[in-house]
Amino acid sequence: MSSIKQIPVIEEKRTNPLARVFDELVRFCRSRSLFLLHYCTGCGAIELPPAMTSRFDMERLGIQPMVSPRQADILLITGYVSIKTLKRVILTYEQMGSPKYVIGICSCTVNGGMYWQSYATAKKLDEYMPVDLYIAGCMPRPEAVIEGLQQLMQRIKTGEAKGWEDYYRNYDYYLGNQQKLFGNDWQTPTDVITEAKHYDLLGEGTLGEHTALLEQHQQPLEALEMRLGHQVKEPAE
Amino acid sequence: MTLTLLDELLLFSGVTVLVALFLGRRLPAGWMVTILYGIQLLSLLKMAPLGYGGDPIPSTLILEVMGQTLSWRFDALSWYFALITLGSALLSSWYACGEWEQRFRQAGGNVWLFHLAMALNVFSMLILLASGDLLSLFIGWELVSWAGFLLMAMAGGVATRAAMRYITYAMVGAMAIFGGIALVYVSAGSLQYDAILTAVSQMGTPHLWMLVILFSAGFGIKMGLMPFHLWQAPAYAETPGPGSAFLGAISSRMGLFAILLVLVKLFGIVNIESLKIPFTLIDARDLLAWIAVFTIIFPTFTAMKQNDARELLAWHGIGQGGYMLLGLVVADAMGAAGGLLHVFNHATYQAALFMAVTAVIHRTGTSDLNKLGGLVVRMPLSFMVLLVGIIGLAGLPPMNGFVSKWLVYRSLLNEGMPLLFVAAVIGTLGTILSVYKLIHNIFLGQLRVEHEHIKEAPWSMMIPMLILAAIIFITGLLPGIPLAWVASVQEAVGLSVPNYTLGGVESASGSLDMIWVIGVLFAGFGIGALVFYSAGKSKRVHQLDNYAGGHFLTADIRYQYSDNFYAGLMHLIGGWYRGSFLWLEKSVKSLVEFLSLGMQGIYRRANAEFYLLSTALFVIAWVVI
């Protein structure tokens, strides 16, 4: 979370008074319609079904589950992330369209929790991707989950939830941590640097030694080298 | 003796056959034949007043055979069908005569025979369409059957088997028609249309029943009506590409032409309606309507199950024939207009679809829907043509298929036939599902590695396809153009005419104006485009940058499958596909085999005394009685 505080605050200069109103309207609408992709890896997942279903009913807040990252706004990570899992989490996060928000649920995402001593667990999630909100507890009850989601909505409405911009501006930092864990040849299919240029979010920390290392090791994606592994049986006429 | 316009047309058509026959082996037959089809079409267009209520044009050729006069003439009905025939022949031949032909020759096909068969088909169809009495109709009918056989059988192998099956059915149909003609001759004493018209009014119910059954079975076999539909799909699908486009567009509509001529024009829908089926509430017309509706439903759902693109389309050809017949037997102004308009519309999109699928076969070498996918990035124009075609086939705006189906639905509602309406809509549901399978499995999804380097279809094939796509859209936007021809056809066969405008039809119970429909549709697209393009920059992502439950996709992982499409639906309705008609066909076949074995047994015995004795007995019995 410390890195989020380092984001230089850029005052938006809007001369048109209507533009401010419009921005607020957009933020309000955004906070009221959130699709949630839950990456449930640990015991915290068990608290989500009650939060989603009739008892606590998160859909009344405009939040509902989504099956693919392209359409999702929130990535919800419950419980410990092993190194193997973390690769998938990062892949999924990078595939989400901006603006996107990350919520870490349970103590494990905060500091490794009871897996602190494990060699296979990534302890702090926010070293690898910007986390907008933590909901601590082992495990947090559905009330806490709902409370956390409401707080995220509030932060979106006020424009404070800007973790996703930080990922582009300080990509080198996150990539460095990822490389430390996964090795120098770590790469994801998403080209984050091009995306940063695309969103005009190329900051001072976007490029650095780690991105240079990435460029060295990067293998180009070869889309069409595919084969059918097995012969599918023809359906009977 | 001056040649009339019809003589000119038939002469050109005959010349086309001769050119293909004698010059086709050495010179490039394709281009010559295509140009000759163009000339035929021009000569047909000189007869255009026929399409707007002009007087029939006779041929100077009149034959006297055994006291029967054989004559040929063109009226609005013939002109309308001839226009479709020549249009599809011109475009199919154009499509064939470029790169397709070279590939076909390399693969061991006989290009000369192909063009000859096409020219023969066109010639015989024109003769059939021009027939001026029942005898010349029968002659034309036989010519069309055998010419069709030649085109279907020329690919050899599976195609020959399918063509043999076709010709068996066609001969059974021809016998039925011949029987019908003999019955007509007995009661009317002549085979001229005028004489038949007067004779029909004095016919008794059993006589009329017999004729209706014989003629609708005979012509229905050519149309692929249930339960005589089994031959059509394999026969059309196995014909060489452009040939199947031509056959699919027009060939089986000859059956509809004959039904119109004999059942609607000569017998009259009113007379058919008067034939009540005892102990039920329905009459012969209802029976035909229900046959039409089942012809829509069953073949369409069979099409959904096909895994070969050509077979899928060929099965649809059968199903769409049902809509035409359904519209015709409803026989009010709108229904008949819808049924007739559907002949034109079906020809345009069916030819376009077969051509697009043939283009895919030309490039990839397969039409197996389980072995294609993702071709939209390699063949975008073919994709567009196929898209336009399937929208037409499914009967959705803005393409022309919507107009004709709308007219048929409207007439079913107007005439108070809700059950037929629901059944027709079920057929449309099956159509939409199966055409989605077609476009999805060929063009959408993941491109296969073996198709990475393929190119768009060559221009010689692309231009006819684009022309067809344009026709499909334009006649969808301005259905008044073909509706004018349809109206004069309706007048020619004695049906009432709808109040048509350039954009559709006007009626008290609900009008259709496609200009408005399409205008609103495109305004909607415009709003969508505005939202899309004003939403800021979009970003293309790589094919492997795809979500698979967080899994890293590598080149050897196939993340999109098109095999066994509609598995869930098939789980529900799969049990309904029992192959009952195949079983019926098989049992009839084995019955015939059994009987012929018995007959063979008698001949094989070669027992002279037995034959002598039985002949003597027979003669004595005959003399005594």
Image (tube, helix red, strand yellow):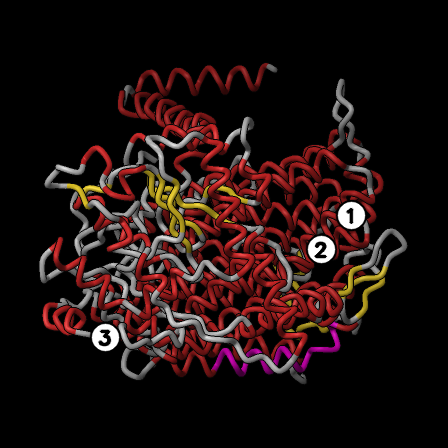
Host chain of mark 2: B
Q: Position of residue A22 (x, y in %)?
A: 63, 69
Q: Quarter of the image holding residue B501?
A: bottom right
Q: Are marks 1 and 3 in contact (CB under 8 Å)?
A: no
Judging from the image, mark 1 belongs to the subunit labelled B
- Foreground mark, 3 or 2, reads 3
Q: Does the magenta stretch include residue B473?
A: no
The three-letter code of the residue at mark 2 reads: Gly
Disc 2: which residue? B338
Residue at x-position 51% and y-position 56%? A156
The answer to whether A176 appears left or right of B291 in the picture is left
Query: Do discs 1 and 2 share a chain?
Result: yes
- Circle 1 residues within 10 Å: few <14, some 14–19, many ≥20: many
* One can see residue B588 in this view: no
In 3D space, how far apart are the residues under numbered discs 3 and 2 (Cα atoms)?
Answer: 66 Å
Specify start and end residues of the magenta stretch as a single range. Answer: B36-51
Query: From where the camera sits, is residue B183 visible?
Result: yes
Quadrant that contains the N terminus of chain B: bottom right
Q: Amino acid under label 1?
A: Ser
Q: In this view, does B271 lie above or below B82?
A: above
Contact (CB < 8 A) between labels 1 and 2? yes
- Residue at 70% x, 63% y is B77
Instruction: Name the side, left or right, on which B508 lies relative to A60.
Output: right
Depth order, front residue of A79/B511:
A79
Question: Front-most of B142 and B466?
Answer: B466
Give, as a three-letter code, the residue at label 3: Leu
Residue B524 is situated, as x and y percent measured from the top left of the image, at 66, 66
